[in-house]
Image (tube, rainbow, N blue to C red):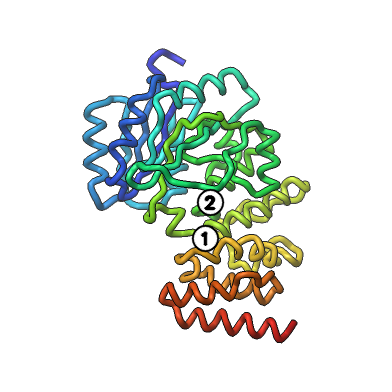
Amino acid sequence: MTDSEPIISVAMSVYNGERFLAPAIESVLAQTLGNFEFLILDDGSHDGTRAIIEHYAMLDSRIRPIMRENRGLVASLNELLANARAPLVARMDADDICLPERFARQHALLLAHEDIGVVGTWTDDIDENGGPYRVTAPDHPVSHEQFLQAIEDALPLLCHPAVMFRRDLVLGVGGYRAAFRHCEDLDLWLRLATVTRIANIPDRLLRYRHYGEQVSSRHATLQQVGAAVARLAYAERRAGRPDPTAALEALPPIDQLDALFGREGMARAVRARVAPGLLYSKAALRDDGFDILCAYIRDGGPRDGLWRTVGRLFLFGEPTRALRLAATLAATRIAN
């Protein structure tokens, strides 16, 4: 590698991100380790995103803009990987803020530990105005052994925009997979866990923003279903069996999962994992999450607190669904 070649490629995909984009870009440009290229892909935005990217690209030659029509996040992430020139890739989102020493700390760890292929950091969670945002989940696992245990316990593994990884490793496992849209990062970590060691730096080197319009809020049901299927696929690989999701461009409906995996109980397992997380989500109870919840009840899932969900549906302005859930609960009570 010559002195002119970057040691890190920063990969950011943006879609209609004008609200928080400028401080996100500035936090990258302010890193204490400055030998990087900054790939910013505008995924067909129709707000002021492009103008903001072009403004900063004029100010700093490390920025490499990519402008094109909308293709979605998975396609954008894989395109960023294909265009990256450095052996290490640092992910960054357009609504978060890096602390100045983030890249230096992650680069130093990967340089000192060749057996580690992915390193994340702990996060400082903030709301849309930059104030504290309370989360109840535990901090991300620090060692690879803790990482594997966190997989078994279904705990958080990595914060996607806080990771730095070895590009060749990610390309070697196939990059991001379109079938796991909205949970493409979890699927990737689960595939990488069997080919490299994964760690997190136990310092809060990224300010991670929570707000109502972000993807994880708008697509909660799809995200949770995909995550549950990704964990089933991980278990198949760990058991030495073929991964039936490997060649999929999209996941099948839940009812077809038994056929996909070649044995009974897979659909029920996914509903059992997903349903408890849908009870308090207005978005999930208004979309396909409602049907998953009803099927979970018919499967014999625990009914604790579900009558309160009937009340929440009335409060959410969904009287028809409230009555359907009440009827499902009553029918399963009689059947049992």
Q: CA distance from mark 1 to mark 2?
A: 8 Å
The residue wearing badge 1 is 222
Front residue of 87/227: it is 227
Assign a secondary structure to mark 2. Answer: loop
Label at residue 182: none
Q: Amino acid at mark 2?
A: Cys
As drawn, the residue found furthest toward the top would be 3
Q: Residue at x 53, y 33 (%)?
A: 120
Q: Is residue 109 above or below residue 162?
A: above
Label at residue 183: 2
* Mark 2 crowdedness (10 Å alpha carbons): few <14, some 14-19, many ≥20: many
Front residue of 134/24: it is 134
Q: Quadrant of residue 95?
A: top left
Query: Where's residue 55, x and y in %?
Result: 21, 34
Q: In screen coordinates, is 256 left or right of 123?
A: right
Quadrant location of the C terminus in the rendered image: bottom right
Query: Where's residue 292, x and y in %?
Result: 58, 70
